[in-house]
Amino acid sequence: MTMTNTELQQRKDAATPRGVGVMCQFYAERALNGEIWDVEGRRYIDFAAGIAVLNTGHRHPKIVAAIEQQLGKFTHTCYQVVPYASYVELAERINHLTPGTHAKKTAFFSSGAEAVENAIKIARAATGRSAVIAFSGAFHGRTMMGMALTGKVAPYKIGFGPFPTEVYHAPFPVPLHGVDTADSLAALQTLFKCDVDPQRVAAIILEPVQGEGGFYAAPQDFMRALRALCDQHGILLIADEIQTGFARTGKLFAMQHYDVLPDLMTIAKSLAGGMPLSAVCGRAEIMDAPAPGGLGGTYAGNPLAIAAALAVIDIIDDEQLCARACVLGDRLKERVHGLRGAVPQIAEVRGMGGMIAVEFTKPGTHEADMAFTKQVQTLALQQGLLLLTCGVYGNVIRFLFPLTISDALMDEALAILESAMRAAADNI
């Protein structure tokens, strides 16, 4: 007998810890492309996509077929014990598709945080240095090093310290909040003068577009300056593309919007269409720095996930999802911009391709309006649209619709979004 949402919620509260925060009070029964149905039969339009994991939608038939085919062969050998050709094939394709024509190598892992951890390991092995610089508002995972690098305290860091040492933070350039490229670069110079010798810095890591931090894109001049700074001091530049990758920004990777290249990239989330898979891709000589056995993991590069990822790459190409991301993102931005007169809380609508966000502040001020943001999210959910918030102050709604969503479903979702925003504004 199917349980109700209320019954499952009671079981969940009794059986699982509160530290695993859960946003929704309903329980998924099935999903397809841009829609989820709960155990009571109610349908939701999914603009969360498992936090940017489902750029190719729920249960894309080509991904399902690829997994089923691999399931008929084998599910696990541990690549480091008995390797398999699909791992090598996916590495070759990632090496070819990531920015730059230089020689590259790729290693696979299971989660985004694992990829970040291993990118830091690789950078330290390649440089013989230990320090790492990250940025305010960054999110790099929930492991100890991931939390150390993350530039947002609540809820990720509270009660979990001390964190690994030799991690430093500089302000990320966000002009809306009064921090420009010059300010961020000056802060880096202050770090070098006051806190850490640049000759001890192994890597600078950043998201080309911050995810949890609020969907702020790194300015072009800032990315160029970071590349020059890294070259000057022998520091490696790591691009965390875990949320930005696989067509979300209108290009396969966000770094393709810039005219500089990273030394290492971390990728995950939409890489495998819902299967747990991540990777570090980088310059061949840097990737070869760790000794044999220094990289890997029991489940790293799981064959089912590898099969899904190969299908994802084909789908993005066959269905032209990079172009689709731009079309959908432009439609969303136009709709939200059209609400500025009715919703004075709209401070900024921004984003690349289909990686769009709207930031809310109290009208006439620069003060973050978290309560209004939460109200929009709640009202939308009541009408069947699933939205995620983000930002250091929780006053940003990010839109992570599947890039395979139909035009009709997108129109329905935008109508709900408009209704929720107007209703929230009218309640003030």
Image (cartoon, helix red, strand yellow):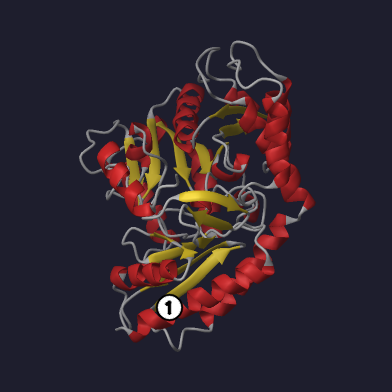
- 258 or 199: nearer the eye? 258
Residue, far left: 159
The C terminus lies in quadrant: bottom left
Looking at the image, is 300 positioned above or below residue 361? above
Q: Crowding near pointer 1: few (<14 within 10 Å), some, many (20+)?
A: many
Q: Residue at x 33, y 32 (%)?
A: 144
Residue 174 image point, x, y percent: 41, 63
**Residue 107 position by quadrant:** top right
**Disc 1: which residue:** 421
Residue, far bottom: 341
Query: Label 1 amino acid?
Result: Met
Q: Is residue 100 left or right of residue 45?
A: right
Task: Say what secondary structure mark 1 lies in.
Answer: helix
Residue 180 appears in the figure:
yes
Looking at the image, is 179 positioned above or below residue 242? below
Looking at the image, is 213 positioned above or below residue 101? below
Residue 161 image point, x, y percent: 22, 35
Residue 196 image point, x, y percent: 32, 37
Looking at the image, is 91 positioned above or below residue 359? above
Q: Is residue 228 left or right of residue 132?
A: right
